[in-house]
Image: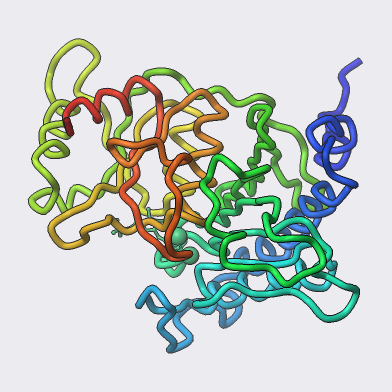
């Protein structure tokens, strides 16, 4: 008899060993994220039907226009995490300062902090392109019972206890790791349940896809230009195929499944690239490594870099191990 696939709830229960140091807090936290993602998913799926596309007329701390759905997703995640009293602090792309959760129920006794990009790729949303949510979870380093501090959020990515993303694509998937491999769950929207559809995701060591915004080619460092030419060269398994959605979660997700390299290098226009170390690169790097891939800034392992600011930017080269190593060899 064919068994029905495991649900996310069942999976969390049967993998309690992933959560051995926590008194159920980490599982509650993941439950909270999976619920908030359903709410965001429901809203996104109505884009075009109700008045939720377009901008709100604000510019966020990154100097980028806030989309209505950026604001919506940010509120949903923050409210869910605050109301359920699970974390003691949050860093979000959409908030200039970190958020301290305190007050009622002694929230500052909570052990975890969350960093998140509530809606990644939102500039695509008005064009019907997939977007995502990215999150990373850390155990606080400040003492429990005191307000969360900046240092709690400036831990290197190798201190993450869990990280993941939700992709609102052709289907909606939650992909996460607690440091024991990567698992992907697909949402059945009719009943609101996620099922384990992609157990133990392993990224091919070598893929055939490269993902980079080639519009910036002339602004890239010479090493990056040379690597792009290498990808295009007629030789052995090349030319590689170019695929760039412009929605990092979607580009990373495709490469995770099929193999490939994702690059957002620095350029003469953007000295540190565009992507944010704390809530974009670190969660993605944790997942990519846990799937057998590699994530660096071209020289250093992303997860070993100590952030100095919560909104700090960093170049990113992430994907199939051999492809990232090859790209690095061109930068040296
Ligand atoms: P966000 O929508 O959260 O601001 O992030 C968008 C990011 C990332 O998803 C994507 O890969 C990259 O910006 C695209 O940037 P370019 O348009 O410069 O290629
Ligand atoms: Mn983003
Ligand atoms: Mn965003």
**Whether residue 98 can be seen here:** yes
Which residue is drawn at the image coordinates 67% and 32% (left, top)?
183
Res 104 → quadrant: bottom right
The image quadrant of residue 64 is bottom left
Instruction: Decide: is 163 above or below 261.
Output: below
Q: Find residue 259 and report its horizontal and vertical position in percent.
A: 42, 26
The quarter in which the N terminus is drawn is top right
Q: Residue furthest front?
A: 143
Instruction: Out of 134 and 170, give the one closest to the viewer.
Output: 134
Left or right: residue 123 versus residue 291 is: left
Q: Quadrant of ligand 1?
A: bottom left
Residue at horizontal 50 percent and vertical 68 percent from the top: 93
Closer to the camera in the image, 120 or 124: 120
Q: Residue 14 location in percent, x, y? A: 88, 30
**Residue 147 placement, left or right of 49:** right
Residue 7 seen from this side: no
Say if 56 sits above or below 188 in the image: below
* Location of residue 35 in the rendering, given as x and y in whole percent from the top left corner: 78, 58
Quadrant of the image containing the C terminus: top left
């Amino acid at each position: 008899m064919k068994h029905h696939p495991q649900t996310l709830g069942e999976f969390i229960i049967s993998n309690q060993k992933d959560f051995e140091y926590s008194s159920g807090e980490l599982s509650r936290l993941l439950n909270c994220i999976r619920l908030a993602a359903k709410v965001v998913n429901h809203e996104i799926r109505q884009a075009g039907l109700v008045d939720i596309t377009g901008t709100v007329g604000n510019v966020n701390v990154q100097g980028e226009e806030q989309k209505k759905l950026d604001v919506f997703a940010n509120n949903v995640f923050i409210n869910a995490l605050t109301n359920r009293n699970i974390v003691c602090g949050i860093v979000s792309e959409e908030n200039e300062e970190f958020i301290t959760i305190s007050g009622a129920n002694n929230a500052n006794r909570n052990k975890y902090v969350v960093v998140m990009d509530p809606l990644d790729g939102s500039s695509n949303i008005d064009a019907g392109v997939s977007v995502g949510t990215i999150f990373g979870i850390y155990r606080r380093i400040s003492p429990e019972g005191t307000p969360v501090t900046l240092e709690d959020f400036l831990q290197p990515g190798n201190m993450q206890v869990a990280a993941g993303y939700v992709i609102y694509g052709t289907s909606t998937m939650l992909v996460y790791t607690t440091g024991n491999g990567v698992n992907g769950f697909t949402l059945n929207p009719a009943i609101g349940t996620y099922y384990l559809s992609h157990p133990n995701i392993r990224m091919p060591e070598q893929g055939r896809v490269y993902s980079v915004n080639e519009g910036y080619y002339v602004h890239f460092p010479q090493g990056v230009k040379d690597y792009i030419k290498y990808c295009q060269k007629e030789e052995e398994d090349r030319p590689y195929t170019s695929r760039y959605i412009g929605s990092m979660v979607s580009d990373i997700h495709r490469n995770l499944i099929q193999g490939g390299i994702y690059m957002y290098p620095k350029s003469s226009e953007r000295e540190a690239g565009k992507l944010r170390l704390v809530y974009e690169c670190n969660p993605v790097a944790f997942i990519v490594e846990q799937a057998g891939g590699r994530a660096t800034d071209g020289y250093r392992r992303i997860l070993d870099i100590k952030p100095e600011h919560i909104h700090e930017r960093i170049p990113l080269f992430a994907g199939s191990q051999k492809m990232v190593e090859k790209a690095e060899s061109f930068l040296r």
